[in-house]
Image (tube, grey):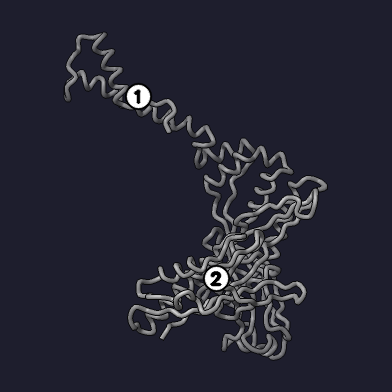
Amino acid sequence: MPLFSQDKDRIFGDIWRNIQIDTNITQSTAGSKGRALAEAPAAKIARMWRSFDLNVTQAFLDGAAGEYLDLIGKMMGVMRAGQQPASVASRDMNVKFFVTSGTFGAINGGASITIPKNTVISTEKDSEGVLFKTLNSVVLSATASSMYISVEAVQTGTIGNVGRNSLKYHNFSNYTDSENDTLKITNDFEVVSAVDRETDINYRYRISNQLQYLARANATSIRLAALSVPGVADVIMIPYAHGIGTFDLIVKSVTPTVSDGLIAAVQSEVAAVKAQGIIANVRKPDESGLSIQGKITFVRRLSQDEERSIIDAATTNLTNYINSLNIGEDFIVNEAVQRVMETSDQIKNIGVANQPFDVVYIYQWNELEDNKIRSKVVGDYHPRDDERLFVENHYAGATPILLTVNR
């Protein structure tokens, strides 16, 4: 929004009135000398006003952008966050080497396999696509069948973020059965910890809250500290969760589930800004998984490839809906049905009246048995305030969202 500037027409009017008063020039029609004498300086002055207005705007936080915003941030002691590569620690239990049957020893003559540092892992064959590298040397025990490892993207920025089961290839071949490609690699969950250079909007927000952040021991400084950790989407603070002098900080990650590594990183950042004597319990939300089975009816008979393509797309849409639910947000059956129906105009219906899905299961943690128990969901599901829903990949098997054709 202009602060001081005047437009060209107004400036021209002022100049022309002065010319009429101070000279004998009275002709202002298009192409006249009088009009030319007034328009030339009017256009120049208007440009100067716009330049002045822009420079003044860049001096204020609300209007500054780019390098000018960097200067304001530097003055406030807040530096813009740069690009960071995607990375996964072994404790996150995400990226792993594995064999589909037997043990690592079975594919290496009974011996353990040593994976060297900087082994390349990729989304496409021959080290193409998005590339990661191992961060240290790893020994795959001869008696084990899988092992989680630490990796980091070769390129910085969000180009290194990959979806679930995207890392399928590696360039390691120093084991006995390498000709049959029996040593496998995968990522159980998305890898989305990479960040691009901080946007002006985010940077401006951090600058505007810097004074509160410097004060420490307040809600703003704690929230900003938690959000500064790559991979954190949001946090929910519950004061007095365990009595006076305590609070819970529930972390929502950009992935469906929250890793132990992310919790540890947030705990470290929060510890630096909380008040002495205050107990901060940084934790995951109670994570409950969903699995769904249903039958789709098509408008007309389609080829198997067409059916498969539509079902795959509907499965993705339904998965994205569930995984995008916030902490404490309800699972709404009608919304799930809508995500399936809007996939293709070839879908006539899903399920039958009053029962669109054959079954919806929820998997909830049972601390007594140290695993999850499955129960059936009838209708919408209303989670607790600290509960988050996601698609259950572990306990529900290989196809937690199973959509088939109603013949």
Assign the C terminus to one quadrant of the image: bottom left
Labels 2 and 1: the sequence-earlier one: 1
- The residue under label 2 is 379
User: Residue most toward the right?
Assistant: 277
Q: Is residue 405 above or below residue 198?
A: below
Identify the secondary structure beneath mark 2: loop
Nearer to us in this view, 278 or 86: 278
Tell me if 16 is positioned left or right of 80 in this view.
Answer: left
Q: Residue at x 78, y 51 (%)?
A: 246
Assign the N terminus to one quadrant of the image: top left
- The residue under label 1 is 45
Q: What amino acid is found at the position of numbered circle 1 in the picture? A: Ile
Q: Residue at x 68, y 87 (%)?
A: 103
Nearer to us in this view, 81 or 234: 234
Specify few, some or many for label 2: CA neighbours under 10 Å numbering under 14, 14-19, or 20 or more. Answer: some
Q: Position of residue 72 (x, y in %)?
A: 57, 36
Q: Residue at x 44, y 71 (%)?
A: 340
Q: Position of residue 165 (x, y in %)?
A: 56, 74
- Name the mark nearer the viewer: 2 or 1: 2
Q: Position of residue 215 (x, y in %)?
A: 71, 39
